């Protein structure tokens, strides 16, 4: 049995994964979705990783999945517990010693964001444009503040963990545009990302398809 460890992004919560979690459980898998200490100004990357490791407990056969800002936390977990694979879904990819604030500049994201147009800057337009209206409204209602503390801390690993890794790019992502993301993944991980239709929140817009992808990753030993 595969145990999927689902890590949300900035200002998110474990709730965001509830549809994907239900799909995976129906297929006989174990799932743990974690609430990170996002609102705690005293919590840094170590505390974020602690929250995930504590939630994992004695589980084995782990596939660790990080979404968006969860890309900073997921590799820290992989460096602390044995995992079968790491999956980034529209994830941020930090470099050793890089702060979250530096990431925006170092990756060329700011230029890519300026070139992204055709919509307003509302949360619905940027993050949830392809999510059913009722789910989008619930997601906004459940949104949490994201403390700035971890973004000021240098990412603590000397290198990405030596575990089989996949990146799932969202082709219609307005937060992380597809062309920029392809380049970001090649530069930081040295791999070509897999791709899925949809925006930044495929766990709400395409939960079955996302679960299909995660299950496929869990069913084979991944190679870069």
Image (tube, rainbow, N blue to C red):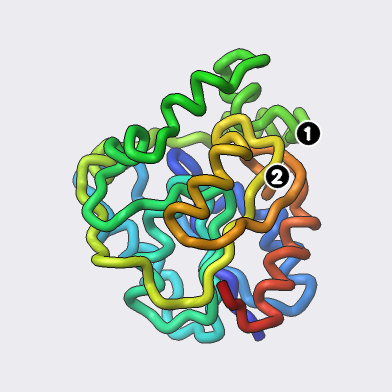
**Which residue has dot 1 on it?**
132
Pick whichever, 170 or 134, lies toward us: 170
Res 6 visible: no
| Residue at 61% in and 17% down | 117
2 lies above or below 38: below
Give the position of the N terminus as an image quadrant.
Answer: bottom right
Q: Earlier in the sequence, mark 2 or mark 1?
A: 1
Residue 204: numbered disc: 2
Answer few, some or many: residues within 10 Å of disc 2's Cα (few below 14, many 20 plus, some between 14 and 19).
Answer: many
Q: Is residue 219 left or right of residue 12?
A: right
Provide residue 218's location: percent of width, then percent of height: 66, 76
Q: Would residue 49 appear left or right of 196 to someone viewing this image?
A: left
- Picture residue at 54% right of the left edge, 38% below the top: 180
Q: In the displayed structure, does residue 85 sit left or right of residue 210?
A: left
Query: Within 10 angstroms of label 1, few (less than 14), some, or many (20 or more) residues?
Result: few
Above or below, comparing residue 222 to residue 187 in the picture = below
| CA gap, disc 2 and disc 1 | 8 Å
Quadrant of the image containing the C terminus: bottom right
The secondary structure type at the circle numbered 1 is: loop
Q: Nearer the viewer, residue 166 or 129?
A: 166
Residue 59 percent coordinates (x, y): 50, 83
């Amino acid at each position: 049995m595969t145990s999927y460890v689902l890590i949300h992004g900035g200002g998110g919560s474990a709730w965001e994964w509830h549809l994907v979690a239900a799909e995976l459980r129906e297929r006989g898998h174990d799932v743990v979705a974690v609430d990170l200490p996002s609102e705690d100004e005293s919590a840094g990357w170590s505390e974020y990783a602690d929250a995930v490791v504590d939630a994992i407990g004695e589980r084995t056969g782990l596939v660790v999945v990080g979404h968006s800002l969860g890309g900073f936390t997921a590799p820290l977990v992989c460096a602390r517990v044995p995992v079968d694979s790491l999956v980034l879904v529209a994830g941020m990819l930090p470099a050793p010693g890089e702060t979250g604030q530096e990431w925006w500049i170092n990756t060329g994201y700011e230029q890519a964001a300026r070139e992204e147009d055709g919509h307003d800057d509302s949360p619905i337009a940027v993050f949830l444009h392809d999510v059913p209206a009722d789910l989008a409204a619930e997601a906004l209602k459940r949104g949490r503040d994201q403390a700035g503390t971890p973004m000021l801390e240098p990412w603590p690993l000397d290198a990405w963990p030596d575990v089989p890794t996949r990146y799932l790019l969202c082709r219609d992502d307005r937060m992380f545009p597809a062309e920029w993301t392809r380049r970001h993944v090649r530069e930081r991980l040295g791999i070509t990302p897999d791709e899925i239709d949809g925006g930044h929140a495929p766990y709400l817009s395409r939960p079955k398809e996302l679960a299909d992808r995660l299950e496929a990753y869990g069913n084979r030993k991944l190679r870069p």
